[in-house]
Structure formats: C-alpha cells, structure tokens
Amino acid sequence: MDTPEPTTPHSTPRDVIILRTILGLALAVIVVLGLWTCYAYLSSPEAIRQPSSQHVHLRLQLIVNGAPVNFAEDKFQTTFNQDICTAALTKEPFHFHDHEDQFVHVHWANLTGGLLLKNYGWNFIGGPDTTLGYRFDRFPRLIRVPIHGLALPKPSRDTNYYVYTGTASNFKERSWKDFLDQKLTDFMSGTPVTRGAGFIPVAYADQQQAAELNDVLGNVVILAQKYKPSDQQVKDRFNHLLPIPESQCSG
C-alpha cells in the first residue's frame, strides 16, 4: 500500500491578512470613538451638552483670605464684540466685560455656580480642569467648551468656603453645595436686586449708547478662608457692593 505524502498547512494569503488587519483597526477606532463619545457625554453637564441662550447678571464678590478678587483685571475680562449683545449663543457661557468688577454676565441657560467658578480656575465639580464639557447640539460634531482661564488665586488646603446672598441689611448664609450644584437662577430666586423684564436683543448699531444693566439676579459674597467669618465681616463685604453700572450690553 502506498503511503500518503504528508500535507503541509496552507499559508494564509497576504491579502486576507491585510483585510483582517484593516478590519481590526477599523473596529478598534470605532470602539475608541464610542468610548470617547460616552466619556464626553457623561462628563459634560446638561447646560454644556445642550446649550441655549439666556442673558442675566449676577453681582459677585469673592474674597480669598481677606483679599478681594478684582474681576476688572484683564485676565478675567472678555473683549466686547457683537455676539455678546445679541440673542445668539455666545462662545463662552460667562463673561466679565466693560472693565467692570463684580458683575458676571451669564449668557447660557441653566448654568451653576460650580461651572462659574470652574470657568475661572476653581474646579469643585470634577472633569478636566481646563474644560467645562462638550457641546452635543451639533452632533456628531463635538465642540469642546474650554474654561476662560486659570485666573483665580490658588487657595490653601485648609481653606473653607462660605457663601452669602442678600444685602448689607438683609443677608443670609447659604449652602456651599447648593451654590455649586443648583442653577444660578434657582439659587438666586427670591434674593434682593432682581431687576428688569429680561434680556431684549437689540441691533449692534444700537449698542453705542450704554444703559444700566437689567435682570440682575442678586448679590453673592463668597469668603474663602480657614475660619467662618463674623457677621461684621460679611456685612462689610455687602457694604462694598458696586453700583449697577451702565454697559454696552445692558440686556
């Protein structure tokens, strides 16, 4: 009987190897993009994922170990331009402009105090320090929303945070967690100095005449220091509230 010749395994054709490699790489890219999209979605607050236009104002004082932060400094300011005074969605959710201290222009709806502080360098709400989140309103294109900058002074590790709303004659201590987590419009609901009927967009040509800010939600004083401030310390800060200014973008 003839002995059959031993067979040798057939080698995989080169084109099959290339095809499998391409498919494997394509699958890996899809998985990575999917994971990245999930991360971007989950790490972005709803107000950043699906932004909508709103224009209100907040009078904010931030005192770090006895030293008031001057928001009129260039590192906090946004250069005045046309989109700031229209109903269109602005590039940044918050602005300080007109070289005014204390007055925050809130341009996106449903923003929180945590997002406000993170926008200027204090991250109490997680996520990357230099990113507020990603916009999904033009999906599948994701738009990164960077912070304005790392402008606030770095607090020491033993710093505690005390937040108050009201006026010099009628202020109260509020929850720090509520300030960080709640929508600013909800947090400030019922506080003094609510003005105006809301933002009324006007043509850019009409901005040449400055007018008094309207829709000021109220006054917030934050003291960042080791020990709780006395009532007199808090009252003194409310006595330093700046008058409501005129602005090129009064709405």
Image: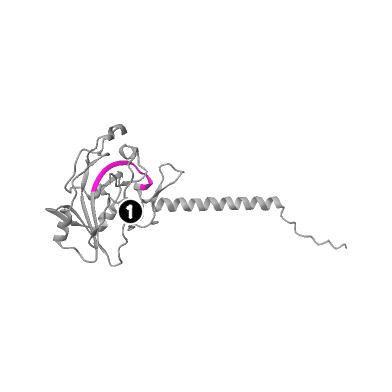
Rendering coords of residue 52 (x, y %)? 34, 41
Rendering coords of residue 247 (x, y %)? 25, 40
Q: What is the total number of numbered labels drawn onto the structure image?
A: 1
- SS at badge 1: loop
Say above or below: 176 vs 208: below
Q: Amino acid at mark 1?
A: Tyr
Left or right of 199? Residue 236 is left
Segment colored magenta: 48-58
Q: Residue furthest bottom?
A: 158
Rendering coords of residue 37 (x, y %)? 46, 50
Left or right of 82? Residue 191 is left
Viewer-closest of 45 and 70: 70
Say above or below: 37 vs 195: below
The residue at which mark 1 appears reads as 120
Is 49 covered by the magenta stretch?
Answer: yes
Q: What is the quadrant of the N terminus in the image?
A: bottom right
Q: What is the quadrant of the C terminus in the image?
A: top left
